[in-house]
Amino acid sequence: MDINFPLILFALIVLGAAIWIADIVWLRKHRDAGAKEPMLVENARALTPVLALVFVIRSFLYEPFQIPSGSMEQTLLVGDFILVNKYTYGIRLPILRNKVMDNNDPARGDVMVFFPPHKDQYYIKRVVGLPGDKVEYKNKVLYINGEMQPQKPLAGNKRSIYRQRLEQLGDVEHQIQLNITVNRNDDRSLVVPEGHYYMMGDNRDNSADSREWGSVHESRIVGRAVAIWMHKKPGWNLPTFSRAGGFD
């Protein structure tokens, strides 16, 4: 399970606000005239508004997210720092995750952050199947409602085990990566239930996704990934902004 950062942040805000209010209502009256404000009170007064602003931005506007694995290569690489739009798919209460305001529904081709059905951990994949769609994956080719999603080979190192292709997924053209040495037993089909979405990684042969654990209920959606803002290679490397920008 990921660390529940919103809950920790909310607890710090409540604690800071309690100390601040206690000082205004009671502690301040019992200090000697001219006495220095205790460091705990000073920090609470200075940091609580800042933490509250961060909490609002992360909860309702944008949340930063770091790519932990290669399941979305080459669209997103390990070490990419991205921004997740929290209001694209509606406003949800922080911590509780209950939707209080509808907005757009996820669209085919969106890159989405969510909690998979089997664990409370952030995942990021691409939406390939919408409610009611019949999704099939045969011989490394995706079919939606019986229609093959076209793939266009990209030039690359022919000695590499990886093949890069452009896949047309509805109105979205995006890059996928295939491993010619892997023959996953993925020849299967599934009709996406109402209120669910079928998710797949762009690195098709190195992605734990809906092919393994099924579709994702809309209540477990976090938001839409919209941009890379920084990249840091693993290890003792300085961050760079060479990959900053939007992506498909």
Image (cartoon, rainbow, N blue to C red):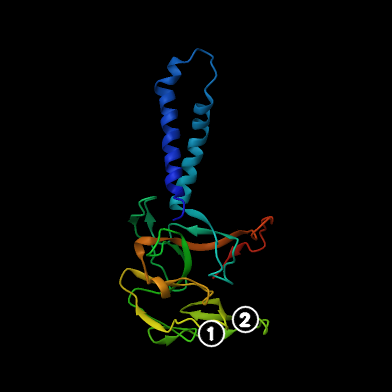
Looking at the rendered structure, the secondary structure element under dot 1 is strand
> Which image quadrant: the N terminus?
bottom left
Q: Residue at x 43, y 16 (%)?
A: 29
Residue type, label 1: Gln
Secondary structure of residue under mark 2: loop
Q: Nearer the viewer, residue 89 or 22?
A: 22
> Identity of the amino acid at label 2?
Ile
Residue 3 against residue 193 in the figure, above or below: above
Task: Give the labeled residue for mark 1.
Answer: 151
Query: Residue 123 or 98: which is nearer the viewer?
Result: 123
For image coordinates 57% across by 85% down, the residue present is 152
Of the two numbered discs 1 and 2 on the same chain, state the one appearing first in sequence.
Answer: 1
The residue sitting at 35% across, 69% down in the picture is: 196
User: In this rendering, would 181 be left or right of 87?
Assistant: right
For discs 1 and 2, the disc positioned in front in the rendered view: 2
Tell whether 223 sits left or right of 96: right
The label on residue 161 is: 2
Q: CA distance from mark 1 to mark 2?
A: 18 Å
Q: Is residue 193 above or below residue 67?
A: below
Q: Position of residue 155 (x, y in %)?
A: 65, 83
Report the quarter where the C terminus lies: bottom right
Picture layout, residue 225 above or below residue 164: above
Res 209 quadrant in image:
bottom left
> Residue 171: x percent and y percent?
48, 77
Residue 33 visible in the snapshot: yes
